[in-house]
Amino acid sequence: MNELLKNIKPERPEPILLKHKPYSVNKKTDRKKVAEKLLSGSYALVEDKFPTGLAVLAELKKTLFGKKSKEDFKAYREKRTEYHHASNNLLVPIRKNKIALPKAPETGWLEKLYPDISDFYLSFPQVQGLNSAWQWYIRGIKYPGLKKKLYPWYGTYFPTRYDHLISFDKWLKNYSGRKSTAIDMGTGCGVLAFKLLNRGFEKVIAADINPNAVISVMENAEKLGLAGRLDVRQSDLFEHCDEKADLIVFNPPWLPAQQDVSGLDSAIYYESGLFERFFEQAGNYLYENGTLLLLFSNLARTAGIGDTHPVEEELEKHNRYRKVRLIKRKVSKPSRKTKRRDHRKDEYVELWELALI
Ligand SMILES: C[S@@+](CC[C@H](N)C(=O)[O-])C[C@H]1O[C@@H](n2cnc3c(N)ncnc32)[C@H](O)[C@@H]1O
């Protein structure tokens, strides 16, 4: 791991340290009582084995949601929030950076993310999140257009649907501009940056505000022997960029945030002002004949979350960029197994190619 990585502190679930031992739970404890405790805001600690915790969470769900009932969306959302708070009061003991319960899954993140502390508590949902991220990390993900798998770090966004990647691949294959430097803004797991390198860009600057993404891309670049051509930076937009590029690519969050966003949510939801700042800054980092490429979607519109479209708004309000082309691609049909909600059926991904005016 290089020097840059050593100085970046990844986001992690905050270790829970308690002065007093919380209410103890084992398989014989009355689960209804535990569920009540959790709902009242008290901590409870699973002490015998991991499956006991899973059984308590199942009981908590039953207490809150009961049998399937026809509730309105608002009531359902409130219950979900309640479940979120209560389930995070159920604690797992961590000793010597391992889950100190029999029959618990192995998660290497406890060593990687907590070099400074070995004994502490985490909540059950946090441990489940770490575990699922560990599975993705050790198995890796194969993306269309990339020969080798990527291994995303904990807390790093990686796409699980590929429509925008297919659009990007097609566009990139036909790109005939200069390939000296590209900037991949909001690189996430680095999938677009690695595609740019594969397609012959001499150097790619991969920037992300999320420290975990930066560590992730750097580690993958080293694994792939591409670290020499990939310059990874933790940066709020172009804050830490200092050179111009032939191509700037940005696959931003697609949905307007309804509340403050942090961590992985900032891959999905954008706060007001993000696009205004992006368009204001991007022109300074683009060569005169350079290309600005945005991947976007009509998801906010089809999901009824908002009618504004940040790229359209930029083109209407300002005189900084012109549209070279807009390529739309209908989102592929859901597999029969997935019950995709209705608003997804009219969804398409958009590829906006812009140039400086
Ligand atoms: C939808 S993800 C795209 C990730 C990846 N490029 C891809 O196509 O799969 C958006 C990314 O933008 C990053 N991001 C959000 N706000 C940012 C900001 N202000 N500056 C830099 N990156 C940001 C997020 O952390 C996330 O990794």
Image (cartoon, grey):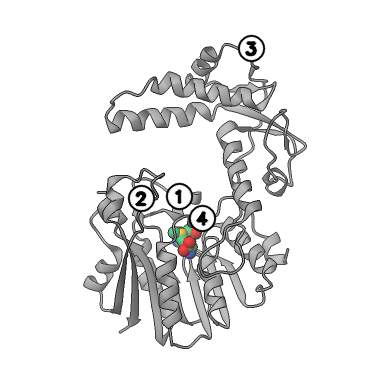
Find out if the beta carbon at label 4 lies less than 8 Å from the nearest ligand 1 atom.
Answer: yes
Q: Earlier in the sequence, mark 4 or mark 2?
A: 4
Q: Secondary structure at mark 4?
A: loop
Q: Earlier in the sequence, mark 2 or mark 3?
A: 3
Residues at marks 2 and 3, CA–CA distance in whole angstroms: 43 Å
Closer-to-camera residue (31/305): 31
Query: Which marked residue is nearer to the observer: mark 3 or mark 1?
Result: 3
Amino acid at dot 4: Tyr
Residue 174, position as x, y percentages in the image:
42, 82
Residue linked to disc 3 = 28
Residue linked to disc 4 = 157
Tell whether label 1 touches label 3 (CB within 8 Å). no
Residue 21, position as x, y percentages in the image:
67, 20
Q: Earlier in the sequence, mark 1 or mark 2?
A: 2
Residues at marks 3 and 1, CA–CA distance in whole angstroms: 38 Å
Disc number placed over residue 257 in the picture, else none: 2
Query: Which marked residue is nearer to the observer: mark 4 or mark 2?
Result: 4
Q: Earlier in the sequence, mark 3 or mark 1?
A: 3
Closer-to-camera residue (303/20): 303
Tell whether label 2 touches label 1 (CB within 8 Å). yes
Closer-to-camera residue (42/228): 228
Amino acid at dot 3: Lys
Residues at marks 1 and 2, CA–CA distance in whole angstroms: 9 Å
Disc number placed over residue 265 in the picture, else none: 1
Amino acid at dot 2: Ala
Looking at the image, is 335 positioned above or below residue 357?
A: above
- Quadrant of residue 223 in the image? bottom right
The crowding category of the residue bearing disc 2, from other C-alpha atoms within 10 Å (few below 14, some 14 to 19, many at least 20), is some
Amino acid at dot 1: Asp
Residue 246, position as x, y percentages in the image:
46, 83
